[in-house]
Image (spheres, rainbow, N blue to C red):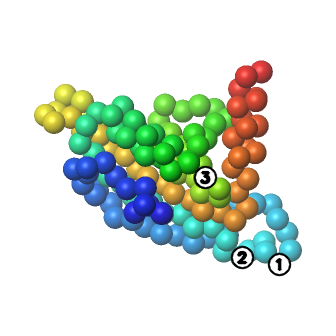
Amino acid sequence: MLERIGVPPGSTVISAVNRTIYSSGSTRRGMWSDTPCAVKWTSTWDVIGTENETLDWYRQRLLADRWELYNQRVPSKLQTLYWKDKWLLTIGHNVAFPMDHPPHARFELLLIWDYWHQLKQTSQDNAERASK
């Protein structure tokens, strides 16, 4: 899925993709409680362009692929989250070098697939709580 999402042109890998399989953090009990049912991929990239240009590149690409912006319970200026089905993509804004020529920024991509994710519902719940 990370290959499908891609990275902006001219990006340089800082840390290659690392995959981890784990049991979900759900509170489910029974035969599935310790079963690995979630996968996490992480990778760090140095991206040519400003932080805003990079975030806009991801926004356009992800929304065109029917991902939705995930409403966080506490909005963050350090992370942007998108969700699609049971996939959650976190784009971590690590550090920006806006005065360098050319400007560039570092981003950490964290992609999680979890069988127990209910992302549509939690995103809607968080949006409703924020509006109160």
Q: CA distance from mark 1 to mark 3?
A: 27 Å
Q: Are marks 1 and 2 in contact (CB under 8 Å)?
A: yes
Residue named by callout 3: 84
Looking at numbered disc 1 in the image, what kind of residue is underneath it? Met
Does residue 58 lie above or below 115 as drawn? above
Residue named by callout 2: 35
- Name the residue at the top extreme: 132
Residue 95 occupies which quadrant of the picture? top left
In the picture, measured across the screen, residue 84 lies left or right of residue 63, that is right
Q: CA distance from mark 1 to mark 2?
A: 8 Å
Residue named by callout 1: 31
Q: Position of residue 109 (x, y in %)?
A: 43, 52
Q: Position of residue 131 (x, y in %)?
A: 73, 22
Does residue 47 lie above or below 36 as drawn? above
Q: Residue at x 33, y 34 (%)?
A: 53
* Nearest the eye: 119 or 96: 119
Between tags 1 and 3, which lies in front? 3
